[in-house]
Image (spheres, helix red, strand yellow):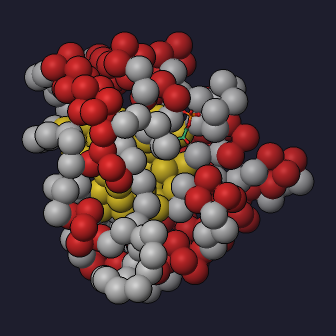
Amino acid sequence: MKNKLIIAGNWKMNKTPNECRILAKEIISSLNGIMGIHVIFSPPFTGLNEIETSNPFFKAAQNCYFEQSGAFTGEVSIEMIKSCDATHVIIGHSERRMLFNEDNYTINQKILAVKKNGLIPIFCIGESLEDRNNGSTEKKISDQIEKGLIGIDSLEGLVVAYEPVWAIGTGVAASPKEIEDIHKFIHNVLKNIDKKHYTQVLYGGSVKPENSEELIRVPGVDGFLIGGASLNVDSFVSIAKAMEKYRSN
Ligand code: 13P
């Protein structure tokens, strides 16, 4: 039996505050009473305060800055995120790495700050198509993990999301075998950092109702981080229900 599973919806730069409120409300009412699964909504910052959650529903910011306050125009502090009752922060999403030049050092600073402030980082890692084609997937992943977690001895209160860049938004998810192999590798790298705590590792990249039943069975997959399919009530709810069904069997 796997640990409690996580389904997280990364809404990226979509939905006005009012649309965020409506989407979360509809999903919560459809998933009322769901068992064994934590459901996390990650709206844009402007939507965080619009969503009301209580266990097993939670809120995540999509990013943060690591300084506490001050002259950092355009940035949002962890304190501000906390005051919206968010419990998690997505860190190091590949879109942040590629489009906003976030490197392993910045990501490490953010993870340290999120943990210090008592929130849970959802730490994203994943190789590009180029990495995969030239055989450097494992090197890239271990580098991202080790550099992102410098200075962290205990992995309690950390979630990892493996999102191969080539599977994000393409409609083509990694295969169950590819996911199984890399999740096993990731769990081993994490174990070398902290033997005591089991870290939940989510898969992300073109997860949809059509493949969620198969992908949730893959050993080492503790849930999903979902982009496109999280923007629609029916598809998100159907994935969550497939996970619940798998867990209850
Ligand atoms: P898609 O589910 O749209 O492929 O996006 C995945 C993702 O980037 C979630 O963070």
User: Does 79 sit left or right of 125 as displayed?
Assistant: left
Is residue 77 placed above or below 243 in the rendered structure?
A: below
User: Does 161 sit left or right of 133 as displayed?
Assistant: left
Question: Which percent across, then down, holds residue 206?
Answer: 59, 29
Quadrant where ligand 1 appears:
top right
| Residue shown at 11% from the left, 23% from the top | 33
- Farthest-out residue, right: 134
| Residue shown at 14% from the left, 40% from the top | 52
Is residue 162 placed above or below 16 in the rendered structure?
A: below
Quadrant of the rendered image containing residue 83: bottom left
Question: Which percent across, then down, holds residue 3?
Answer: 28, 42
Say which of 194 and 17 sits in front: 17
User: Does 63 sit left or right of 46 as displayed?
Assistant: right
Question: Which percent across, then down, holds residue 9?
Answer: 39, 37
Residue 188 visible: no
| Residue shown at 85% from the left, 51% from the top | 130
Is residue 177 placed above or below 3 in the rendered structure?
A: above
User: Does 114 sit left or right of 140 as displayed?
Assistant: left
| Residue shown at 33% from the left, 72% from the top | 77
Which quarter of the rendering shows the C terminus? top left
Quadrant of the rendered image containing residue 16: top left
Is residue 167 placed above or below 186 in the rendered structure?
A: above
Residue 15 visible: yes
Which quarter of the rendering shows the N terminus? top left
Question: Which percent across, then down, holds residue 217?
Answer: 45, 27
